[in-house]
């Protein structure tokens, strides 16, 4: 490179974020294994799928490294299939938790305490 030619510097990518959850079945007092989970991002017009999977035997799921730019996100939990799989009727076939990421690159942990007729969530650490 010569002094007269400017160097092209690529723009930095959004810092990868980390979104995880831990689903606990408060009805049985156990981790909720094999709950379908999906992470979506809201683009201002519609929800866009970023990652999906199932909770593990400990009730945990973590999205692969995704560019978590500031914005609105949603975790969708397939509670209907989970409770059907253990033979328990439920009032909530799906739980959606919508949250805001204010600073890119941070860890966001969103636990879900689940029972057939109620649920609770909070921002974990």
Image: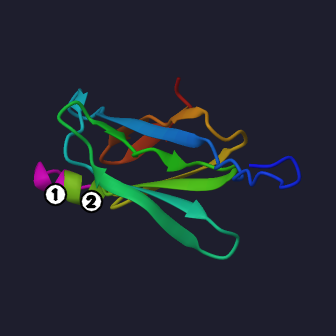
Farthest residue to the bottom: give it.
45
Q: Residue at x 39, y 46 (%)?
A: 64
Q: What residue is shown at x 52% (from left), y 69% (from top)? A: 48
Identify the residue under disc 2.
80
Identify whether 92 is placed above or below 125: below
Quarter of the view holding residue 31: top left
Q: Quadrant of residue 20?
A: top left
**Helix or strand or loop: what does disc 1 sit on?**
helix
* Mark 1 crowd level (few <14, some 14–19, many ≥20, 10 Å Cα): few
Which residue does the numbered mark 1 point to in the structure image? 84
Q: Position of residue 71 (x, y in %)?
A: 69, 54
Work out whether 16 lies above or below 84: above
**Mark on residue 44?**
none
| Scheme of colours in the image | rainbow
Residue 11 in the image: state x and y as whole percent.
72, 52
Q: Quadrant of residue 114?
A: top left
Question: How busy is the neighbourhood of tag 2: few (under 14 within 10 Å), some, or many (20 plus)?
Answer: some
Query: Tag 2's secondary structure?
Result: helix
Q: Is residue 109 magenta?
A: no
Residue in front for this viewpoint, 27 or 102 = 102
Are the residues flagged by discs 1 and 2 in contact, CB closer than 8 Å? yes
Foreground: 107 or 13?
13
| Residue at mark 1 to residue at mark 2: CA–CA distance | 6 Å
Picture residue at 57% right of the left edge, 60% below the top: 41
Magenta stretch, main secondary structure, is loop
Q: Position of residue 108 (x, y in %)?
A: 55, 35
User: Does the magenta run of residues contain 85?
Assistant: yes
Query: Which residue is the extreme one toward the front?
Result: 2
Highlighted range, magenta: 83-90
The answer to whether residue 50 is left or right of residue 3 is left
- Residue 122 visible? The answer is no
């Amino acid at each position: 490179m010569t002094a007269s030619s400017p160097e092209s510097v690529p723009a930095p990518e959004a810092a990868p974020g980390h979104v995880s959850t831990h689903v606990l079945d408060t009805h049985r007092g156990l981790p909720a294994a094999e709950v379908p989970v999906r992470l979506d991002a809201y683009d201002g017009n519609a929800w866009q799928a970023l990652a999906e999977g199932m909770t593990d035997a400990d009730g945990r799921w973590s999205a692969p490294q995704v560019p978590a730019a500031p914005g609105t996100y949603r975790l969708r939990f397939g509670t209907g299939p989970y409770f059907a799989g253990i033979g328990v009727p439920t009032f909530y076939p799906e739980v959606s938790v919508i949250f805001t990421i204010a600073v890119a690159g941070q860890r966001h942990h969103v636990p879900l305490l689940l029972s057939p007729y109620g649920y609770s969530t909070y921002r974990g650490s």
